[in-house]
Amino acid sequence: MNKVWGVVVAVVGGFALGGIALYRQEPINSLWIVVAAVCMYVLGYRFYAAWIAAKVFLVDPTRATPAERLNNGRDFVPTHKWVAFGHHFAAIAGPGPLVGPTLAAQFGYLPGTLWIIVGSVLGGCVQDMTMLMLSTRRDGRSLGQMARDELGPLGGFAALIGTLMIMIILIAVLGLVVVNAMKHSPWGTSTVFATIPVAILVGFYMRSWRPGRVLEASVLGVTLIFLSVFAGGWIDHQPWLRTVFDYPGISLAGFVIVYGWLAAILPVWLLLAPRDYLSTFLKLGTIFLLAIAILLMHPQIKMPAITQFVDGTGPVFSGKVFPFVFITIACGAISGFHALVSSGTTPKLIANERDVRLIGYGSMALESLVAIMAMIAATLLDPGVYFAINVGAGVVGAAPEIAVRTITSWGFPVTTEQMANLAHDMGESTLFARTGGAPSLAVGMANIFGSTFGRGLLSVWYHFAIMFEAVFILTTVDAGTRVGRFMLQDLLGHVWKPLGRTSWYPSVVIASTLIVAGWGYFLYIGVIDPNGGINILWPLFGISNQMLAAIALSVATGIIIKSSKARYALVTALPLAWLALVTTVAAWQKVVSSNPKLGFFSGASDMAAKLAAGTLPPDRAAVASQLIFNQRLDGWLTVLFTAILWFVIIDMSRVCLRRLRGLPVIRSSEAPYQPTTLEGIEVAAGLRGAVQGSH
Amino acid sequence: MGHTSSTGRVAVGLVSAAWRYLRAVSGDDAYERYLAHHAVQHAGEPIMTRKAFFTDRQRQKWTGVTRCC
């Protein structure tokens, strides 16, 4: 029976994929894309993941997991697989898969969509599942610890440095997305600001008034946040109040920086933890709603399958479709960051090794589906509108008339009236050059929600979408700064012992300040960049994220070969090889390209030459020296990322070659077998009871 | 409710299962689980209050990488 289903899914998926690939004449319906993606996930899960679990990991349901062996009722707790799935998905799903596909849509819908599907099924899901399994077999150790245990101290150190760097770039780029979404938008800004007191209120509720009543507190918080979306609309209509919340990017960047710093040094219960509950509920709720709305509305895709910008002349960001579509999609297909959650946190919940496939592979497949929905939301817009929103004023000019003329000349007609009407519908003063991906995604989501649930509230839907993205970006800013702080303290502890104490307040303040200064710098530069900043920062983020994935896959490949499974090593070695190729080519181009729009160093030299010749307009000349320094810094960072990546790959290859030649290698850190005595987890019994009631 | 139909029972069962799932996945029932665990594994040892348990749990949760991009 299972086989029959497999064949049906394969045939439907094949037809849908074929449909996408061959459809050229007329606009394609988004339903094809959803069907193709879901079928591929199901096939990948049903066959590939099951094969990996059985052959490569030798999953053993009789083996006790760390959650059972080390059960302390707190962090090590055997958890029902669907509950652990919920936790894991909530932890890995961030704003990345929403932003990446939106930017990659400049190549047309096809390249990004194919990579989201193929990359996740063969790469991202495999990485997440592998890390989860390896960490579960090693008492829930983190990626850095596993790298140290299995490859040696140098590999572990490289992984730690890599993680810290990616964290700083990540927070800066996400901060930039949220700043660009709030820029001169009193409605958006007041709504996002309102989430801070709401989070604090929820924090007090959960800590002091009704300790641990998570659901009550979340219902209260989510209700207040919904009200704040409407309140923002009211504020937007009060001439005196709206000026209070009308800020340029630079002030908003200042707010985000101060906020991030405070959130990192204040106790977690006050701001970070309650905000996380709220953002998790909003995130899961909105994703679910978006999926329903896309199924009901099944909009036509208006973006062509492939645009002329695959040749590298793209206005949203520079670079050819290879390698930059892979760098840009990042989290929606493969995210190195997931390796950090899949090792360390989630393994402590795994009740049985059997559950690893659902939690590791399944969660990532769902995350990939979120990326597909973001791609649909971006490509259902008129392409002219998409480019008008996503291209910086530095590329098409600040005046609307000039911008629409340039964009229309690319073959994507758009008019100033159309943009003015759209901005009016969305309750914004303008939608030109709102780079970063959030505003165009919000317009797309407002369209989807509006057509499904009523167009009257278009501006409310738009600001709901902005708030939804901002809330979970700010959660990443909080949590990321805190994680970065821990890592930095760990490193500083080697220099001077007291700095390594995570609860010593001076050390907390020093480390937090350094981390915030790190991402605050990149955020500031991104804001003053007339090209929108995102075109520089996002590729840097993509490269660092894919590099982290390659480090994780290296560790995994090393472990697989060490455990005498060399014949299956391609499972992780193949995505590793692809990522190494893609990131190295992208890094190479970003470093050595003589095209000033693409290469960091040539961009810096080009601007320096123009500055010296006095040909820059005064507003650009004022910030030019900072932008020049930053481009050079980005160039050197890219070199460093690539060096770290190859260092880990070579270290891994060295260990593997020794193993294959029969020489001694560091012993496996796998925990010894112990039989399980668990018999099933509560929630399972409850669900089973409910289902049995129907027979 | 002496004479509930079978579909009614199923509906009630499903709603209650969904409710239990929501409580489990959000951590709303974490203290009850801790009490149950404590009663079985550490009977007689000192037990954390509800407030102390959640403070401790939150500290644990936010020490390390728990959120992604």
Image (cartoon, coloured by chain):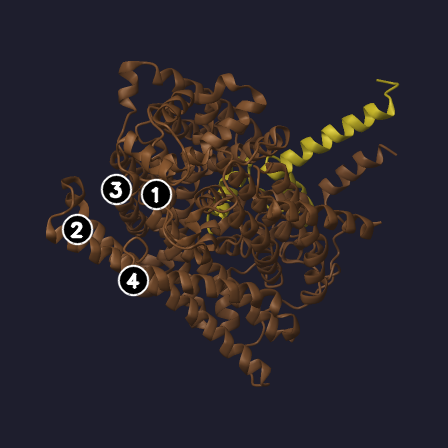
Chain colours: A brown, B yellow
State whether discs 1 and 3 lie on one chain: yes
The residue at which mark 1 appears reads as A265
Question: Percent from the top left, x then y, of residue A636?
Answer: 29, 62
Q: Label 2 lies in what chain?
A: A
> Label 4, label 3: how many angstroms apart (C-alpha)?
22 Å
Mark found first going from the N terminus, 1 or 3: 1
Confirm whether residue A78 shows in the render.
no
The residue tagged with tag 4: helix, strand or loop?
helix
The residue at which mark 2 appears reads as A625
> Label 3 neighbourhood size at 10 Å, few (<14), some (14-19), many (20+)?
some
Mark found first going from the N terminus, 4 or 2: 2
Mark found first going from the N terminus, 1 or 4: 1
The residue at which mark 3 appears reads as A530
> Label 2, label 3: how many angstroms apart (C-alpha)?
13 Å
> Label 4 neighbourhood size at 10 Å, few (<14), some (14-19), many (20+)?
some
State whether discs 2 and 3 lie on one chain: yes
> Label 1, label 4: how many angstroms apart (C-alpha)?
31 Å
Residue type at the position of mark 3: Pro
Mark found first going from the N terminus, 2 or 3: 3
Numbered tag placed on residue A636 in the rendering: 4
> Label 4, label 2: how many angstroms apart (C-alpha)?
17 Å
Residue type at the position of mark 4: Trp
Between A385 and A643, the one nearer to me in the picture:
A385
Residue type at the position of mark 2: Ser
Q: Quadrant of residue A685?
A: top right
Numbered tag placed on residue A167 in the rendering: none
Q: Are marks 1 and 4 in contact (CB under 8 Å)?
A: no
